[in-house]
């Protein structure tokens, strides 16, 4: 025995159309007064949720020593093969013998998967919430060790975008 | 006619013309902002405070753009069509009374450019001429999309003008005059003397027909972006396109003003005797007229961003099989009531 599907028979009320039309108008009127969800981008910046994977940074200890010990784990874990590290003997005398002389990430190749962050035994490399970095040349998008340390300085207070919003133009 | 009278008429013409054009600008801005608000966006807000100079920026852009006349068009008609559409749209407002009489320089001045004794016929005639602009634009463009747009527009006109005219007839029966001034005068007093309460059915028919008349959604079949690219104005660019645009909004303004005049007491403020208040009364009446008109203009935009477009056959069915019989029924009721009243 097959399934009997009854189609909807419009009632007299439905056939008048006007009640339904007014209902529709009320829906759009409600949206008319609702809060607008537009973010006026350059003036006002979207704050990404926790765990957003944006631009990388290299962490430092409080005394200024770079956390990275140039173990190459991140480069090994990187599926896009965008990290290049040259190790050297550390100038600091704290039992950690190596540090990166050169630490470059090709941001055009990077897929922002966050594997490097997970692989790192020293919690040295981390992905920040910064999403709006751009440059006029490909070379400018290869970020070096100093650049990554600068990103750390910019983002260590965790309020990179909310700080910009405060300085930006008022909401229109 | 003496010199003063001539000057008064000239000033009134200028005021009405400038008022209409200003409202067109406001409407272009309002359309974009309201549509944005309804969709949860902000809309244009960069040109001037809250973006109020956006229509001016658009106008400048239209003037600077290259005016393209495609090969193969019927040139004289192609150039004439936007004017045929725009000029009647701006002329229609002339007979609409937008306020009670004022007394200046020792003479009574009606706030109406021309008190034509066949006011309603004048409006119906001019709005019908406007459709020629659309049809000719579609015809002369030498493009299948434009032609289909023009064709649809004329079919739409035939099926809606009838119902609209018949809805107006029942109003004429009540007021006994074609003069818009008399129709407004007939609705003076309190709320319930407005025609919308005496003739609710005629009002609904008229309202729906007006949307078809002005080619607005849900009846904008002659433009129908998804099917006809841009409809009758596909091949137009620069200021000629802007003229179509302006004509559409001018038509909306006239339609809103006409709806207010016929069904919402025109410039009437309920429970207030405007004539007794002198100049203040006139100002009050103009304000009330503008507010009522503003509501209907908002309704035009509101409806546009709420309802989907009717299909061609649905439109025809609605026009011929629903609205026309309803309008005839309404006339029958009204005439029956009047006869009954006269006999008693």
Image (cartoon, rainbow, N blue to C red):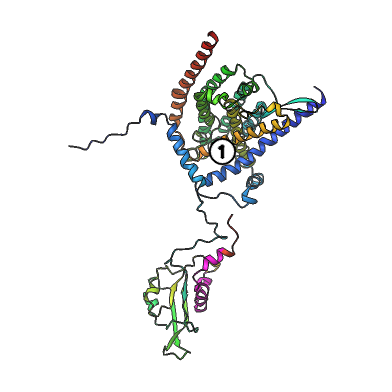
Residue A43, given in percent of the width and then of the height, sits at 57, 60
**Quarter of image, res B300:** top right
The number of numbered badges drawn on the structure is: 1
Q: Which residue is mark 1?
A: B298
Q: Is residue B198 above or below residue B42?
A: above
Which structural element holds mark 1?
Answer: helix
Q: Which residues are magenta?
A: A138-165
Residue B227, given in percent of the width and then of the height, sits at 47, 38
Residue at the far top in the pictured view? B343
Circle 1 crowding by C-alpha within 10 Å: few under 14, some 14–19, many from 20: some
| Front position in the image: B237 or B109 | B109
Instruction: Assess whether residue A154 is covered by the magenta stretch.
Output: yes
**Quarter of image, res B75:** top right
Residue B50, given in percent of the width and then of the height, sits at 61, 50
The answer to whether residue B330 shows anywhere in this view is yes
The answer to whether residue A133 shows anywhere in this view is no
Residue B106, given in percent of the width and then of the height, sits at 80, 26
């Amino acid at each position: 025995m097959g399934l009997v599907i009854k189609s909807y028979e419009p009632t007299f009320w439905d056939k008048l159309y006007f009640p339904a039309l007014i209902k529709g108008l009320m829906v759009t009127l409600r949206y008319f007064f609702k809060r607008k969800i537009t973010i006026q981008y350059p003036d006002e910046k979207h704050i990404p949720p926790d765990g957003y994977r944006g631009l990388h940074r290299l962490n430092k200890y409080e005394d200024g020593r770079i956390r990275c010990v140039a173990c190459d784990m991140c480069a090994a874990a990187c599926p896009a093969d965008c990290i290049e590290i040259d190790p050297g003997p550390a100038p600091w005398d704290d039992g950690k013998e190596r540090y990166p002389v050169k630490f470059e990430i090709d941001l055009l190749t990077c897929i922002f998967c966050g594997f490097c962050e997970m692989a790192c035994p020293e919690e040295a490399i981390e992905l920040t919430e910064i999403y709006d970095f751009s440059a006029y040349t490909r070379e400018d998008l290869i970020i070096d060790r100093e650049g990554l340390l600068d990103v750390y300085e910019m983002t260590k207070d965790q309020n990179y975008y909310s700080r910009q919003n405060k300085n930006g133009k008022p909401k229109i | 006619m003496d010199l003063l009278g001539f000057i008064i008429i000239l000033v009134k013409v200028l005021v009405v013309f400038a008022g209409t054009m200003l409202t067109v600008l406001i409407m272009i801005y309002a359309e974009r902002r309201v549509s944005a608000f309804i969709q949860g966006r902000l809309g244009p807000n960069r040109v001037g405070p809250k973006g109020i100079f956006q229509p001016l920026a658009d106008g400048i852009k239209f003037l600077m753009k290259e005016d393209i006349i495609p090969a193969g068009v019927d040139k004289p008609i192609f150039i004439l069509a936007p004017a045929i559409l725009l000029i009647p749209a701006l002329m229609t407002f002339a007979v609409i009374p937008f306020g009670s009489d004022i007394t200046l320089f020792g003479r009574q001045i009606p706030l109406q450019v021309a008190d034509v004794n066949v006011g309603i016929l004048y409006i119906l005639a001019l709005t019908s001429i406007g459709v020629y602009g659309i049809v000719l634009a579609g015809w002369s463009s030498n493009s299948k999309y434009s032609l289909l747009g023009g064709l649809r527009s004329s079919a739409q006109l035939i099926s809606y003008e009838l119902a609209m005219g018949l809805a107006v007839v029942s109003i004429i029966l009540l007021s006994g005059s074609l003069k818009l001034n008399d129709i407004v005068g007939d609705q003076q007093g309190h709320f319930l003397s407005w025609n919308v309460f005496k003739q609710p059915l005629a009002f609904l028919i008229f309202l729906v027909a007006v949307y078809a008349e002005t080619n607005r959604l849900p009846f904008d079949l002659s433009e129908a972006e998804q099917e006809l690219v841009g409809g009758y104005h596909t091949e137009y660019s620069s200021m000629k396109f802007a003229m179509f645009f302006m004509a559409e909004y001018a038509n909306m303004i006239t339609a809103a003003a006409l709806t207010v005049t016929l069904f919402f007491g025109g410039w009437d403020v309920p429970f207030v005797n405007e004539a007794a208040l002198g100049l203040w009364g006139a100002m009050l009446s103009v304000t009330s007229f503008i507010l009522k008109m503003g509501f209907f203009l908002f309704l035009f935009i509101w409806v546009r961003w709420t309802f989907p477009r009717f299909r061609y056959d649905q439109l025809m069915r609605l026009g011929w099989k629903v609205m026309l019989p309803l309008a005839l029924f309404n006339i029958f009721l009204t005439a029956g009531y009047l006869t009954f009243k006269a006999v008693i």
